[in-house]
Amino acid sequence: MKKIIRISEHEHYEGEVKDGDIPHGQGILIDEKRKVKHEGTFKDGFRDGLATATTIDKQGNEIRLTGIFNKDKFGPDYGFYELPNNELYEGELKDMNFHGKGKYRFSNGMIKEGIFEKGEIKNVTKEYPFIEFAEKYFNIFLKETKPKLKNDGEWIFTSHPSNEYQKLVRENYFLKDFIREIIQDNCKSLLVALEKFNIKYDYSFDTNQSTNINKITYEDGSKYSGGMIDNKKHGQGTIIFANGDKFVGEWKNDKMNGRGTLILSNGEEKVGLWKDGELVE
């Protein structure tokens, strides 16, 4: 069961719960204004027992922690922090702090991997600029999806990503963040990325080629572009639902069926194998 729970004056939790309103399972802890220490005796949910966790956000921007919460523990053992100034952390946690193996993207664009202790990196094992990381996976993204731009300004993915690529995206938060930025808003930033990385790529769509790509707008405002058979979504296709959710992947008889990615309007992603409209793995 999923819920939105107010934790404190400036924090709330969105995700799975247990025993009523106790965070337990996949979820996101959102701190809208984290400027104070969480110190003292906490009861219920991920705060149970005496503990202190301190993170200072001088600008007052929200901080998001995504992970697997346990009603009997103080925060996840592993998670992904989205921080102000476009900074990111993925790795092991202890008492809501970076602790153990992890990697951090700093606001200057550098990524450092290593061992963290109480929120600070103590042993750097690898260091590299994010732009190198981004360029590498952007090229893989182009190779896997082969996006084409139609005359009406709509992007079409002409090739479906391999299982290996989807697994990589699903398990790498830094990559998920990067790919999400590229394909949001009908892939408007694709051309920006090509120019930024100085990548030569033929994205022109041949209107004379044989294709079964159809474009349809439904009564509820949902918009679909892709393959169809007997007026039903079938094959590779993309739909933007009226509520802002977006699905890119395979269809069969009007239902999501095969490999695909569902991007919810809140930014959450569900990637994997679908059957009869449901995610099965």
Image (cartoon, helix red, strand yellow):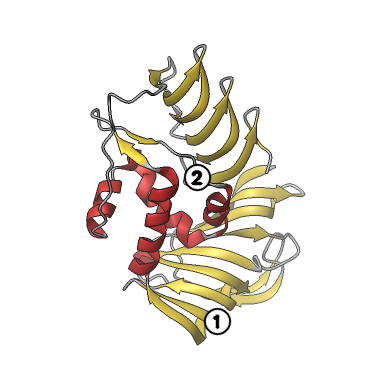
* Residue at 52% across, 27% down: 235
Label at residue 116: 1
Q: Nearer the viewer, residue 199 or 223?
A: 199
Label at residue 161: 2
24 lies left or right of 190 = right
The first of marks 1 and 2 along the sequence is 1
Report x, y in % for residue 28. Answer: 56, 55
Q: Nearer the viewer, residue 29 or 200?
A: 200
> Which numbered mark, 1 or 2, is in the foreground of this view?
2
Label 1 sits on a secondary structure element that is: strand
Position of residue 209 relative to residue 144, above or below, is above
Label 2 sits on a secondary structure element that is: loop
Question: Which image quarter holds the N terminus?
Answer: top right
| Residue most extreme to the front | 209
| Whether residue 130 is visible | yes
Label at residue 32: none
Q: Nearer the viewer, residue 32 or 193?
A: 193
| Whether residue 189 is visible | no
* Residue at 65% across, 65% down: 76
Number of numbered discs overlaid on the protein picture: 2
* Residue at 35% across, 68% down: 132
* Residue at 39% across, 19% down: 217
> What residue type is disc 2 on?
Pro
Q: Picture quarter containing residue 136?
A: bottom left
The answer to whether the residues at label 1 and label 2 have Cβ atoms under 8 Å apart is: no
> What residue type is disc 1 on?
Phe
